[in-house]
Image (tube, rainbow, N blue to C red):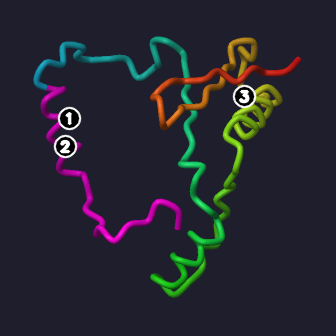
Amino acid sequence: MAGHSDTPFEPGTDELIARNATYAASFSDEHLSVAPAKHQAIVACMDSRMTEDALKANLEAELGIKPWWALASFTDPYADTLQSMRRLELSPFIPHKQHVRGFVYDVDTGLLHEVELEE
């Protein structure tokens, strides 16, 4: 699996809970509405550097069963983001399609690069 190291896995849940406690200590937005105020949705994906076959093989070796679900892996994050944007454009559940935008996060620079939806 790409990025695999010999360092044992350590769950980071305790760190997330501690950070949440710090955030909540200064939280002033009590009784928030369950409706999203900004009416925005963010769709994110997993690391594109994973190889699907290798991951499934590793899971099968560790668990004794190959996953039945597809990872929908990709090699080109720009092409995959564009495809996802097109799917949203075709969705009957997205009312404001003129506002769909896509970005690729650059793991080397930390910058977001916008993916243009071709007309």
**Rendered residue at 54%/15% (across/down):** 39
Q: Is residue 91 magenta?
A: no
Label 1: element kind: helix
Q: Residues within 10 Å of mark 1 (few under 14, many from 20)?
A: few
Residue 119 falls in image quadrant: top right
Q: Quick one: which residue is furthest to the front in this view? A: 108
Q: Residue at x 54, y 28 (%)?
A: 42
Q: Residue tagged by mark 1?
A: 20
- Tell me which numbered mark, 3 or 1, is placed earlier along the sequence: 1
Range covered by the magenta-colored residues: 1-24
Q: Residue at x 60, y 79 (%)?
A: 66
**Pointer 2: what residue?**
17
The vertical placement of 92 against 59, above or below, is above
Circles 1 and 2: CB distance less than 8 Å? yes
Percent x, y of residue 11: 26, 59
The amino acid type, in three-letter code, at marker 2 is: Ile
Local secondary structure at mark 2: helix
The extreme right residue here reads 119
Mark 3, Cα crowd under 10 Å, few <14 / some 14-19 / many 20+, is few
Q: Is residue 3 magenta?
A: yes
Q: Which mark is residue 93?
A: 3
Q: Is residue 42 left or right of residue 90?
A: left
Please state which amino acid type lies under the numbered disc 1.
Answer: Asn
Q: Could you say which disc has been placed on residue 51 in the image?
A: none
Q: Amino acid at mark 3?
A: Phe
Percent of width and height locating residue 88: 74, 30
Location of residue 70 by image quarter: bottom right
Inter-mark Cα distance, 2 to 3 = 34 Å
**Residue at (25%, 62%) from the top-left corner?**
10
